[in-house]
Image (spheres, rainbow, N blue to C red):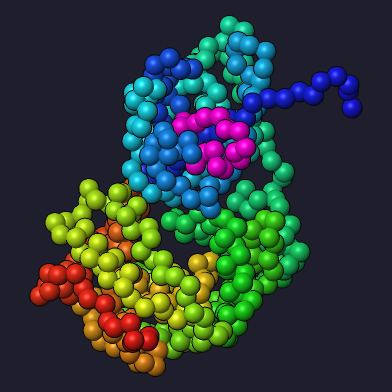
Amino acid sequence: MSGGDRHTVPVDVHLVLRRDGESGPEVLLSRRAGPVYATGLWHLPSGHLDPGEDMVEAVIREAREETGVLIAAEDVTAAVTVHHHPPTGSRSRIGVFFEVRQWNGQPQVMEPDRCDGMDWYPLDDLPAPMVAYCQAGLDAYRAGLPAAVHFQQPGDTVEHSPDGPDRTHLLAGPPTGEAELPYRLRVFAEQAIGRIAHATEVSWVRTGSRVWRLTGAGGGTWYLKRHRGRKFHDREVAAYRSWVPALGPRAPRLIAAEPAAQAVVVSALAGRSLHGMVLGAADEARVQHDLGRLVRALHRSAPEQPAESATAADKVKRHLVGARPYLAEGDEDLVLALASAYADLPKPVLVPTHGDLQYRNVLLDDAGAVLLCDFERSEYGAVTRDLVRLSDTWTGRPDLRAAFLDGYGRPLTPTEELRLECEAAFDAISGIAYGTSHDDPEVTERGHRTLHRLHATHANDPRAPHAPSRKETP
């Protein structure tokens, strides 16, 4: 090790806010203005770390201060690291680029003295003029590479010039053997199931988690999932180890878990997702009945727990900020009335819940058996937590609701009926806020459909819904 002073560099954070556009992925860029570095040039939202702040905290803060969007820590994923040297000065710096695909709120210019423009641009058609440092990071990101060195020379311009010298040196990660399966995940999976002959990515477009279908060299199929955050990994592993076994062959089995990589390997289910499947009325009622029995088994897979507080309404006002421009007349009043009623409800008894019970996570095998998958949102919750999104399938189909509850083994109590309405309204507002900011028309429409249904339910009672007596227990 050489003597002398240690080399130190500043650390920047850069936000790659990404959405799916008509012609492919798009990123949010802002144009710098005023007495700032690279004024007049396009750049990602970015900034420096505050004292005592970690990188994730910094990028979340910068996103809020520059664009107004709110980001949860579990939605922040590392994308690219760039070692950059500007054309002037003697110090280099490290830029860490973070990808975010889920957030709340609509991006807008929050610092007009430093930014005079903000818009979405296709990743493959970035605007000019761009900051060369930012361009280097996006070049690596677009190539799917983890790092780049971008050392400019005296006389180079801060602005990226397609005709100028190329100072970007892209760095590859460890060899993967297959581009779609990262090396470290391959090692983990092969330790669990043996040599992999083929891996195909089958990730759901709306989630930050990534999923691969694995085929073993000797046959057999499994699924490898890398979670988008520690919370989701811990929830799914805990569910597989403690609750899911109660479902028997109707759910996957955990083969291996790797906390450091936040990944799991699970057994495959031989079934097709109900999402988009067309069934006859009688067949769909039978599916709902069987699903009710399956959900009952999950809810009874561990002892009930008392709730410490009712928190489902805590975020409704924040979601209203993003959803408000897209709400119909009376929507906000309805949601706030339900939030008020929710606050007066007695605390529910909590049971193990799936957390994202909708048709895309329900499978049907060739024999007609109903199967359940994807437990990354599982946690203790009220019974109604698992009925919120499923109840969308009951709209206009009281026979499906009756079939599910018959399979579940009991009707809902009046308290649970009101709790379900309240939580459905909160989920609708969250869906509209998310769907409109992420160009997801299906999630947006589900939210509007839910609010329309709730308006119809309360058409004859314009006042705030009344909570049942606190003496009633669910």
Q: In this view, does 413 lie to the left or right of 37?
A: left
Depicted 252 relative to depicted 323: above or below? below
Taking the spot 58% from the left edge, 80% from the top edge, the residue there is 243
Q: Give the range drawn in magenta.
A: 44-60
**In x, y percent, where is residue 376?**
53, 66
Residue 279 in sight here:
yes
Taking the spot 35% from the left edge, 72% from the top edge, the residue there is 388
**In x, y percent, where is residue 324?**
24, 51
Spot the residue most to the top: 155
Q: Is residue 241 left or right of residue 61?
A: right
Depicted 445 relative to depicted 14: above or below? below
Q: How many marks?
A: 0
User: 96 or 393: nearer the eye?
Assistant: 96
Depicted 442 relative to depicted 255: above or below? above
Depicted 460 relative to depicted 65: above or below? below
Q: In which quarter of the image is the C terminus?
A: bottom left
The image quarter in which residue 303 lies: bottom right
Magenta includes 251?
A: no
Spot the residue most to the left: 460
Magenta includes 57?
A: yes
Taking the spot 44% from the left edge, 55% from the top edge, the residue there is 205
Taking the spot 51% from the left edge, 71% from the top edge, the residue there is 378
Residue 129 in sight here:
no
Q: In which quarter of the image is the N terminus?
A: top right
**In x, y percent, where is residue 389?**
35, 71
User: 163 or 60: nearer the eye?
Assistant: 60
**In x, y percent, where is residue 288?**
36, 84
